[in-house]
Image: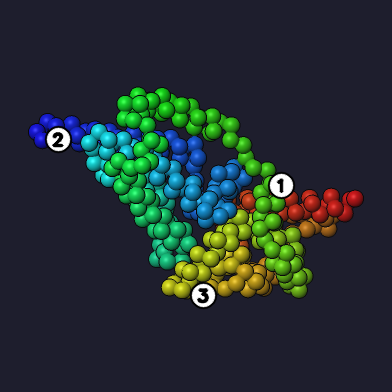
Amino acid sequence: MTRGTQMTDISMTVGIVLAGLILLRIFYKAIEINWPINYITLNDSIDLIASRSIWKYFGFTLVPVYLVALLLAVNAGRIGLPSLVVGISIATIHALTHQGRGLLGTIRRFQGRIAEAQSFWVYITLIPAMIFSGFAAGSWGVPTRLDFMIPEPDEFFKALWTTALIAVFGAYLVKKYKRAQKIDDVALISMREVSENLSNLAYERAAEYRTEHRLVQAILYTENLQRPRWFRRIEHIKGWFFKSGTYGIMQVKAPGPISDEESIEIAIRDHLAGANVRTVDGFPDREQLREILHAYNSNPKFVDAAEAMYDFLWQQERELYSM
């Protein structure tokens, strides 16, 4: 192979890798996932969907990378280019520039106590898994019985620019017309996920500590949205090696893993005992509500989400008693 041929092959390989990264960039610009490093808000409909189960989360983050790497790696192999290099390069660069950014944000946020951050463990699991998906995709670069599913190089590269333009237009439409979730829908999702036993326990402990039950439930349902049950299981696994952290459905600080029931007890007893934001006329004291929520969790997105959740629960109760 001459030097000129080698340079041509390198240039084509780099071009194919860049094409894959651009396609992924377009896709994730439209379907942007900021969870778990950021709190879910009413405007984050994709985050809400992706966070509800481990399969949905890894499906949103891994499957598109694997499919793009597979498509480009197979076509690279057909024209004599190193398919394994293409598959691994696409997945690795994407992982480092996207999930790596989330990992760095987590490290900065939890300086000195990084082991306590659940998102840290999600990212260090996801990044190697994504790189492996590129390896798996690149391994398909040799002829296989599934070749018929991948378009021929001529067909693929002719259609690539059309595909890219359609993807850009589609991303624009998704961004423009993506609607915010209504608090009613978001609240009902969380309320369905929380067991009746936990809801009843929160109500009982609120009464025991003379705490407004709506306030407790607003925090409970909001924290469940941010840290669903599958994510709380990861917290417990992390707790086998690094004890201290936040645990349970109420996300309270503890020296080691605790149950959802224990977290409810600790949250009300140590942080919310006696808290009541209802005024004499039955309406919530808005300033006091936000102060209590901020004291419980200072993240502004949490405060906004929990306030909206409280309003929903309060309105539901008013409608119930007005019947």
Q: Position of residue 233 (x, y in %)?
A: 53, 65
The residue that label 2 is drawn on is 6
**Which residue lies at the image location 70% right of the left edge and 51% below the top edge?**
188
Tag 1: residue type? Asp
- Quadrant location of the N terminus in the rendered image: top left
Which of the two marks, 3 or 2, is nearer to us in this view? 2
**Which residue lies at the image location 45% right of the left edge and 40% below the top edge?**
28
Give the CA separation, mark 3 to mark 2. Answer: 57 Å
How crowded pointer 2 is (Cα within 10 Å; few <14, some 14-19, many 20+) is rated as few
Q: Position of residue 77 (x, y in %)?
A: 27, 38
**Which residue lies at the image location 50% right of the left edge and 64% below the top edge?**
234
Residue 41 visible? The answer is: yes
Residue found at the far front of this picture: 145
Q: Secondary structure at mark 2?
A: helix
Precedes in sequence: disc 1 or disc 2? 2
- Tell whether 238 sits left or right of 320: left
Q: Secondary structure at mark 1?
A: helix
The residue that label 1 is drawn on is 184
Q: Position of residue 290 (x, y in %)?
A: 66, 55
**Which residue lies at the image location 36% right of the left edge and 38% below the top edge?**
147
Precedes in sequence: disc 3 or disc 1? 1
Query: Badges 3 and 2: C-beta atoms under 8 Å apart?
Result: no
Q: Tag count in the figure?
A: 3
The residue closer to the viewer here, 317 or 123, is 123
Give the CA separation, mark 3 to mark 1. Answer: 34 Å
59 to 233, vertically: above or below:
above
Tag 3: residue type? Gly
How crowded pointer 1 is (Cα within 10 Å; few <14, some 14-19, many 20+) is rated as few
Q: Secondary structure at mark 3?
A: loop
Tag 2: residue type? Gln
The residue that label 3 is drawn on is 256
